[in-house]
Image: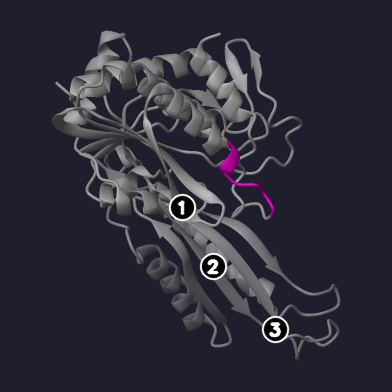
Amino acid sequence: MDPVIELLSDLVARNSVNPSLVPGAPGEAAVAEVARAWMAAAGLDVVMQDVSPGRQNVIGVLEGRETGPTVMLCGHLDTVGVEGMETPFTPRIEDGRLYGRGSQDMKGGVAAMLGAAARLAPTWKRGKLIVAGVVDEEYESAGAEALVKAWRADAAIVTEPTDLQLAVAHKGFAWIEVTTKGRAAHGSRPAEGRDAIMRMGRVLAALETRDRELQARPPQGLQGVASLHASIISGGRELSVYPDRCVLQMERRTVSGEEGKAPLVEVEGILTRLRAQDVQFDASARLMTARPPYSLDASHPLPSTIAAALAARNLKASPVGMSFWTDAAILAAAGIPSVLFGPGGAGLHSVEEYVNIDDVLVCRDVLAETVSAFQP
Protein backbone atom coordinates (compact mmCIF):
# COMPACT_ATOMS: atom_id res chain seq x y z
CA MET A 1 0.00 0.00 0.00
CA ASP A 2 1.24 3.48 -0.83
CA PRO A 3 2.47 5.27 2.32
CA VAL A 4 0.05 8.15 1.68
CA ILE A 5 -2.91 5.76 1.80
CA GLU A 6 -1.53 4.27 5.01
CA LEU A 7 -1.36 7.82 6.34
CA LEU A 8 -4.93 8.47 5.22
CA SER A 9 -6.11 5.34 7.04
CA ASP A 10 -4.34 6.53 10.16
CA LEU A 11 -5.98 9.95 9.90
CA VAL A 12 -9.46 8.49 9.42
CA ALA A 13 -8.96 6.14 12.37
CA ARG A 14 -8.59 9.16 14.68
CA ASN A 15 -11.78 10.69 15.98
CA SER A 16 -11.58 14.43 15.24
CA VAL A 17 -15.24 15.40 15.51
CA ASN A 18 -15.53 19.12 16.16
CA PRO A 19 -16.61 19.73 19.78
CA SER A 20 -18.29 22.99 18.80
CA LEU A 21 -20.71 20.90 16.72
CA VAL A 22 -21.01 17.88 19.02
CA PRO A 23 -20.58 18.68 22.73
CA GLY A 24 -18.12 16.32 24.32
CA ALA A 25 -16.41 15.35 21.06
CA PRO A 26 -12.61 15.09 21.33
CA GLY A 27 -11.61 17.60 18.67
CA GLU A 28 -8.50 17.50 16.52
CA ALA A 29 -5.69 16.63 18.95
CA ALA A 30 -5.25 12.98 17.94
CA VAL A 31 -5.27 13.63 14.21
CA ALA A 32 -3.00 16.66 14.65
CA GLU A 33 -0.46 14.37 16.32
CA VAL A 34 -0.55 12.01 13.32
CA ALA A 35 0.08 14.96 10.99
CA ARG A 36 2.83 16.34 13.24
CA ALA A 37 4.66 13.03 13.35
CA TRP A 38 4.44 12.59 9.57
CA MET A 39 5.77 16.08 8.86
CA ALA A 40 8.58 15.75 11.37
CA ALA A 41 9.62 12.39 9.90
CA ALA A 42 9.62 13.96 6.43
CA GLY A 43 12.06 16.65 7.56
CA LEU A 44 9.74 19.63 8.00
CA ASP A 45 10.10 22.00 10.92
CA VAL A 46 6.85 21.68 12.88
CA VAL A 47 5.05 24.31 14.93
CA MET A 48 1.96 23.70 17.04
CA GLN A 49 -0.19 26.84 17.13
CA ASP A 50 -2.64 27.21 20.02
CA VAL A 51 -6.12 28.18 18.83
CA SER A 52 -8.26 27.38 21.87
CA PRO A 53 -7.82 25.09 24.90
CA GLY A 54 -6.90 21.61 23.64
CA ARG A 55 -7.11 22.62 19.98
CA GLN A 56 -4.00 23.39 17.94
CA ASN A 57 -3.14 24.00 14.32
CA VAL A 58 -0.20 21.88 13.17
CA ILE A 59 2.12 23.70 10.77
CA GLY A 60 5.09 22.23 8.91
CA VAL A 61 7.66 24.41 7.15
CA LEU A 62 10.27 23.81 4.47
CA GLU A 63 12.58 26.79 4.04
CA GLY A 64 15.20 26.83 1.31
CA ARG A 65 18.60 28.48 1.39
CA GLU A 66 17.63 30.68 -1.56
CA THR A 67 14.94 33.33 -1.45
CA GLY A 68 11.76 32.65 -3.38
CA PRO A 69 7.97 32.58 -3.16
CA THR A 70 6.11 31.17 -0.19
CA VAL A 71 3.43 28.62 -1.02
CA MET A 72 0.91 27.28 1.48
CA LEU A 73 -0.97 23.98 1.45
CA CYS A 74 -3.91 24.07 3.84
CA GLY A 75 -6.53 21.61 5.02
CA HIS A 76 -8.80 21.23 8.02
CA LEU A 77 -8.46 18.42 10.56
CA ASP A 78 -11.93 18.45 12.11
CA THR A 79 -15.00 16.55 10.95
CA VAL A 80 -18.72 16.74 11.52
CA GLY A 81 -20.49 14.25 13.77
CA VAL A 82 -21.03 10.54 13.19
CA GLU A 83 -24.67 9.95 14.15
CA GLY A 84 -26.07 7.05 12.13
CA MET A 85 -22.65 5.66 11.16
CA GLU A 86 -21.84 2.12 12.31
CA THR A 87 -18.01 2.21 12.26
CA PRO A 88 -17.00 5.80 11.46
CA PHE A 89 -13.39 5.46 12.62
CA THR A 90 -12.61 2.07 11.13
CA PRO A 91 -11.13 2.76 7.67
CA ARG A 92 -12.39 0.31 5.06
CA ILE A 93 -10.93 -0.09 1.59
CA GLU A 94 -13.29 -1.46 -1.02
CA ASP A 95 -13.48 -1.09 -4.82
CA GLY A 96 -10.79 1.58 -4.91
CA ARG A 97 -12.41 3.66 -2.19
CA LEU A 98 -11.49 4.34 1.41
CA TYR A 99 -14.53 4.67 3.67
CA GLY A 100 -14.83 6.42 7.04
CA ARG A 101 -15.75 9.73 8.62
CA GLY A 102 -13.62 12.50 7.18
CA SER A 103 -12.21 10.39 4.35
CA GLN A 104 -13.55 12.82 1.76
CA ASP A 105 -14.03 15.89 3.94
CA MET A 106 -11.17 16.31 4.12
CA LYS A 107 -8.56 13.87 5.35
CA GLY A 108 -8.00 12.65 1.79
CA GLY A 109 -6.83 16.14 0.88
CA VAL A 110 -4.79 16.43 4.07
CA ALA A 111 -3.03 13.13 3.32
CA ALA A 112 -2.31 14.31 -0.24
CA MET A 113 -0.74 17.58 0.89
CA LEU A 114 1.36 15.84 3.56
CA GLY A 115 2.48 13.34 0.94
CA ALA A 116 3.40 16.14 -1.44
CA ALA A 117 5.47 17.84 1.26
CA ALA A 118 7.30 14.62 2.01
CA ARG A 119 8.11 14.22 -1.68
CA LEU A 120 9.41 17.79 -1.94
CA ALA A 121 11.41 17.89 1.29
CA PRO A 122 14.60 16.04 0.24
CA THR A 123 15.41 18.46 -2.60
CA TRP A 124 13.91 21.70 -1.28
CA LYS A 125 16.24 24.60 -2.04
CA ARG A 126 14.34 27.81 -2.75
CA GLY A 127 11.54 29.72 -1.11
CA LYS A 128 9.24 28.43 1.59
CA LEU A 129 6.53 25.79 1.79
CA ILE A 130 3.99 26.01 4.61
CA VAL A 131 1.80 22.97 5.24
CA ALA A 132 -1.05 23.79 7.62
CA GLY A 133 -3.54 21.46 9.25
CA VAL A 134 -6.13 23.72 10.86
CA VAL A 135 -8.94 23.21 13.36
CA ASP A 136 -12.60 24.17 13.45
CA GLU A 137 -13.42 24.67 9.75
CA GLU A 138 -16.71 22.85 10.16
CA TYR A 139 -17.93 25.44 12.68
CA GLU A 140 -16.40 28.91 12.64
CA SER A 141 -12.91 28.42 11.14
CA ALA A 142 -11.10 29.57 14.27
CA GLY A 143 -8.06 27.64 13.03
CA ALA A 144 -7.77 29.48 9.73
CA GLU A 145 -8.38 32.81 11.47
CA ALA A 146 -5.47 32.08 13.83
CA LEU A 147 -3.28 30.81 10.99
CA VAL A 148 -3.42 34.00 8.92
CA LYS A 149 -2.59 36.16 11.94
CA ALA A 150 0.81 34.49 12.20
CA TRP A 151 1.64 33.15 8.73
CA ARG A 152 1.79 34.69 5.27
CA ALA A 153 2.18 33.22 1.80
CA ASP A 154 2.25 34.36 -1.81
CA ALA A 155 -0.28 31.70 -2.80
CA ALA A 156 -2.23 28.85 -1.20
CA ILE A 157 -3.92 25.62 -2.22
CA VAL A 158 -6.75 24.43 0.01
CA THR A 159 -7.15 20.69 -0.53
CA GLU A 160 -10.91 20.43 -0.09
CA PRO A 161 -12.60 17.68 -2.15
CA THR A 162 -13.07 19.03 -5.68
CA ASP A 163 -13.08 15.76 -7.69
CA LEU A 164 -9.63 16.72 -9.02
CA GLN A 165 -11.05 19.90 -10.50
CA LEU A 166 -9.43 23.29 -10.18
CA ALA A 167 -11.79 25.55 -8.23
CA VAL A 168 -11.24 29.30 -8.10
CA ALA A 169 -14.55 30.35 -6.54
CA HIS A 170 -17.09 29.31 -3.96
CA LYS A 171 -20.22 30.57 -2.24
CA GLY A 172 -20.43 32.22 1.16
CA PHE A 173 -23.05 31.70 3.84
CA ALA A 174 -24.89 33.39 6.68
CA TRP A 175 -26.62 31.77 9.64
CA ILE A 176 -29.61 33.76 10.89
CA GLU A 177 -31.91 33.19 13.84
CA VAL A 178 -35.52 34.37 13.60
CA THR A 179 -37.77 34.55 16.67
CA THR A 180 -41.54 35.02 16.58
CA LYS A 181 -43.35 35.92 19.79
CA GLY A 182 -46.91 35.07 20.81
CA ARG A 183 -48.86 34.96 24.03
CA ALA A 184 -49.29 31.86 26.13
CA ALA A 185 -52.86 30.86 27.01
CA HIS A 186 -54.93 27.76 27.60
CA GLY A 187 -55.84 26.10 24.33
CA SER A 188 -59.54 26.52 25.08
CA ARG A 189 -59.23 30.32 25.18
CA PRO A 190 -58.26 31.52 21.71
CA ALA A 191 -59.14 35.14 22.48
CA GLU A 192 -56.36 35.21 25.06
CA GLY A 193 -53.69 33.31 23.12
CA ARG A 194 -51.40 34.31 20.30
CA ASP A 195 -49.73 31.45 18.38
CA ALA A 196 -46.00 32.09 17.78
CA ILE A 197 -45.64 28.93 15.68
CA MET A 198 -48.45 29.96 13.32
CA ARG A 199 -46.75 33.31 12.93
CA MET A 200 -43.50 31.57 12.10
CA GLY A 201 -45.43 29.81 9.36
CA ARG A 202 -45.85 33.19 7.67
CA VAL A 203 -42.10 33.72 7.88
CA LEU A 204 -41.43 30.30 6.36
CA ALA A 205 -43.82 30.95 3.49
CA ALA A 206 -42.11 34.26 2.73
CA LEU A 207 -38.68 32.65 2.92
CA GLU A 208 -39.75 29.91 0.51
CA THR A 209 -40.87 32.57 -1.97
CA ARG A 210 -37.56 34.38 -1.57
CA ASP A 211 -35.62 31.16 -2.15
CA ARG A 212 -37.43 30.59 -5.44
CA GLU A 213 -36.59 34.15 -6.48
CA LEU A 214 -32.92 33.70 -5.63
CA GLN A 215 -32.57 30.42 -7.51
CA ALA A 216 -34.27 31.89 -10.58
CA ARG A 217 -31.55 34.52 -10.94
CA PRO A 218 -28.72 34.14 -13.47
CA PRO A 219 -25.63 32.47 -11.95
CA GLN A 220 -23.01 34.75 -10.43
CA GLY A 221 -19.96 33.65 -12.39
CA LEU A 222 -18.58 30.32 -11.20
CA GLN A 223 -20.29 30.71 -7.81
CA GLY A 224 -23.72 29.78 -9.16
CA VAL A 225 -26.93 31.02 -7.57
CA ALA A 226 -27.80 32.05 -4.04
CA SER A 227 -30.26 30.05 -1.94
CA LEU A 228 -31.69 29.66 1.54
CA HIS A 229 -33.23 26.96 3.66
CA ALA A 230 -34.79 26.49 7.08
CA SER A 231 -32.39 24.42 9.18
CA ILE A 232 -33.69 24.06 12.75
CA ILE A 233 -37.00 25.09 14.29
CA SER A 234 -38.34 24.84 17.83
CA GLY A 235 -41.30 26.15 19.78
CA GLY A 236 -44.19 25.33 22.03
CA ARG A 237 -44.54 23.98 25.56
CA GLU A 238 -47.36 21.49 25.61
CA LEU A 239 -50.35 20.44 23.52
CA SER A 240 -52.96 22.46 25.42
CA VAL A 241 -51.05 25.77 25.46
CA TYR A 242 -50.73 28.49 22.83
CA PRO A 243 -47.00 28.77 22.09
CA ASP A 244 -45.53 32.11 23.10
CA ARG A 245 -42.23 31.68 21.27
CA CYS A 246 -40.88 29.99 18.15
CA VAL A 247 -37.24 30.05 17.01
CA LEU A 248 -36.00 29.32 13.49
CA GLN A 249 -32.34 28.94 12.58
CA MET A 250 -31.79 29.25 8.85
CA GLU A 251 -28.92 29.29 6.39
CA ARG A 252 -28.51 31.67 3.49
CA ARG A 253 -25.94 30.72 0.83
CA THR A 254 -24.48 33.88 -0.69
CA VAL A 255 -22.68 34.96 -3.86
CA SER A 256 -20.55 38.02 -4.59
CA GLY A 257 -22.39 41.23 -3.79
CA GLU A 258 -24.19 39.71 -0.78
CA GLU A 259 -21.44 40.01 1.80
CA GLY A 260 -21.69 41.35 5.33
CA LYS A 261 -25.12 41.97 6.75
CA ALA A 262 -26.95 41.82 3.40
CA PRO A 263 -28.67 38.47 4.22
CA LEU A 264 -29.84 39.83 7.59
CA VAL A 265 -31.21 42.97 5.96
CA GLU A 266 -33.10 40.73 3.54
CA VAL A 267 -34.76 38.78 6.37
CA GLU A 268 -35.53 41.94 8.32
CA GLY A 269 -37.26 43.26 5.21
CA ILE A 270 -39.51 40.20 5.20
CA LEU A 271 -40.39 40.75 8.87
CA THR A 272 -41.15 44.40 8.20
CA ARG A 273 -43.61 43.46 5.46
CA LEU A 274 -45.30 40.92 7.74
CA ARG A 275 -45.66 43.53 10.49
CA ALA A 276 -47.33 45.88 7.99
CA GLN A 277 -49.91 43.15 7.30
CA ASP A 278 -50.61 42.45 10.99
CA VAL A 279 -49.96 44.94 13.79
CA GLN A 280 -49.84 42.06 16.29
CA PHE A 281 -47.05 40.28 14.40
CA ASP A 282 -43.97 40.33 16.66
CA ALA A 283 -40.68 38.97 15.34
CA SER A 284 -36.97 39.69 15.32
CA ALA A 285 -33.88 38.41 13.54
CA ARG A 286 -30.20 38.29 14.41
CA LEU A 287 -27.10 37.30 12.48
CA MET A 288 -25.41 34.32 14.13
CA THR A 289 -22.35 34.18 11.87
CA ALA A 290 -21.43 34.84 8.26
CA ARG A 291 -18.62 34.00 5.88
CA PRO A 292 -18.05 35.71 2.53
CA PRO A 293 -18.11 34.21 -0.95
CA TYR A 294 -14.78 33.97 -2.76
CA SER A 295 -13.47 34.28 -6.28
CA LEU A 296 -9.97 34.43 -7.78
CA ASP A 297 -9.12 35.59 -11.29
CA ALA A 298 -8.32 32.43 -13.24
CA SER A 299 -5.42 34.23 -14.94
CA HIS A 300 -3.47 34.30 -11.64
CA PRO A 301 -0.24 32.26 -11.89
CA LEU A 302 -1.37 29.71 -9.30
CA PRO A 303 -4.48 28.35 -11.10
CA SER A 304 -2.66 28.44 -14.43
CA THR A 305 0.18 26.39 -12.91
CA ILE A 306 -2.23 23.77 -11.57
CA ALA A 307 -4.11 23.76 -14.88
CA ALA A 308 -0.90 22.89 -16.72
CA ALA A 309 -0.29 19.92 -14.39
CA LEU A 310 -3.87 18.72 -14.93
CA ALA A 311 -3.74 19.12 -18.69
CA ALA A 312 -0.54 17.05 -18.79
CA ARG A 313 -2.54 14.22 -17.21
CA ASN A 314 -5.51 14.66 -19.56
CA LEU A 315 -7.62 15.88 -16.65
CA LYS A 316 -10.08 18.76 -16.83
CA ALA A 317 -8.07 21.96 -16.49
CA SER A 318 -10.70 24.68 -16.89
CA PRO A 319 -11.58 26.40 -13.59
CA VAL A 320 -14.84 25.71 -11.77
CA GLY A 321 -16.66 26.98 -8.69
CA MET A 322 -17.67 25.07 -5.57
CA SER A 323 -21.07 25.28 -3.88
CA PHE A 324 -19.65 24.87 -0.37
CA TRP A 325 -17.75 27.44 1.70
CA THR A 326 -14.06 26.94 2.53
CA ASP A 327 -11.16 28.47 4.43
CA ALA A 328 -9.87 29.83 1.10
CA ALA A 329 -12.02 32.91 1.71
CA ILE A 330 -10.20 33.57 5.00
CA LEU A 331 -6.79 33.12 3.42
CA ALA A 332 -7.75 35.43 0.56
CA ALA A 333 -9.07 38.08 2.94
CA ALA A 334 -5.61 38.05 4.55
CA GLY A 335 -3.99 38.71 1.18
CA ILE A 336 -3.17 35.13 0.19
CA PRO A 337 -4.54 34.27 -3.29
CA SER A 338 -6.01 30.78 -2.97
CA VAL A 339 -7.47 27.96 -5.02
CA LEU A 340 -9.17 24.69 -4.14
CA PHE A 341 -7.89 21.36 -5.39
CA GLY A 342 -8.50 17.97 -3.86
CA PRO A 343 -9.55 14.37 -4.47
CA GLY A 344 -13.01 13.09 -5.32
CA GLY A 345 -15.39 10.85 -3.45
CA ALA A 346 -18.87 11.07 -2.01
CA GLY A 347 -20.88 11.26 1.18
CA LEU A 348 -19.41 14.26 2.94
CA HIS A 349 -21.50 14.88 6.09
CA SER A 350 -23.54 11.72 5.36
CA VAL A 351 -23.68 8.28 6.98
CA GLU A 352 -21.48 6.70 4.29
CA GLU A 353 -18.45 8.73 3.28
CA TYR A 354 -15.57 7.72 1.04
CA VAL A 355 -12.67 9.11 -0.97
CA ASN A 356 -11.29 7.66 -4.21
CA ILE A 357 -7.86 6.22 -3.46
CA ASP A 358 -6.39 6.92 -6.90
CA ASP A 359 -7.57 10.53 -6.63
CA VAL A 360 -5.61 11.00 -3.40
CA LEU A 361 -2.42 9.85 -5.14
CA VAL A 362 -3.05 12.02 -8.20
CA CYS A 363 -3.75 14.95 -5.92
CA ARG A 364 -0.45 14.41 -4.13
CA ASP A 365 1.45 14.32 -7.43
CA VAL A 366 -0.26 17.42 -8.82
CA LEU A 367 0.38 19.34 -5.60
CA ALA A 368 4.07 18.43 -5.61
CA GLU A 369 4.43 19.33 -9.27
CA THR A 370 2.58 22.62 -8.84
CA VAL A 371 4.63 23.71 -5.85
CA SER A 372 7.84 22.81 -7.69
CA ALA A 373 6.75 24.78 -10.77
CA PHE A 374 5.86 27.73 -8.56
CA GLN A 375 9.45 27.71 -7.27
CA PRO A 376 11.46 28.06 -10.52
Going by the numbered disc 1, the residue's amino acid type is: Asp
Please name the residue that numbered disc 1 is placed on.
Answer: 50
Q: Position of residue 232 (x, y in %)?
A: 63, 59
In space, the residues marked 1 and 3 are separated at their CA atoms by 49 Å
Q: Secondary structure at mark 1?
A: strand
Q: Secondary structure at mark 3?
A: loop
For the image, the number of numbered tags is: 3
Q: Residue at x 70, y 81 (%)?
A: 244
Q: Residue at x 40, y 14 (%)?
A: 362
In space, the residues marked 3 and 2 are separated at their CA atoms by 21 Å
Magenta span of residues: 24-30
Please name the residue that numbered disc 2 is placed on.
Answer: 177
Relative side of 62 to 326, left or right = left
Which quadrant of the view contains residue 163? top left
- In the rendered structure, are the residues bearing label 1 and label 3 in contact, judged by CB atoms less than 8 Å apart? no
Relative side of 243 to 21, left or right = right
Which quadrant of the view contains residue 30? top right
Going by the numbered disc 3, the residue's amino acid type is: Arg
- In the rendered structure, are the residues bearing label 3 and label 2 in contact, judged by CB atoms less than 8 Å apart? no
Please name the residue that numbered disc 3 is placed on.
Answer: 194
Which quadrant of the view contains residue 125? top left
Q: Position of residue 195 (x, y in %)?
A: 70, 78
- Looking at the rendered image, the disc whose residue lies closer to the viewer, 3 or 2, is 2
Q: Position of residue 269 (x, y in %)?
A: 41, 72
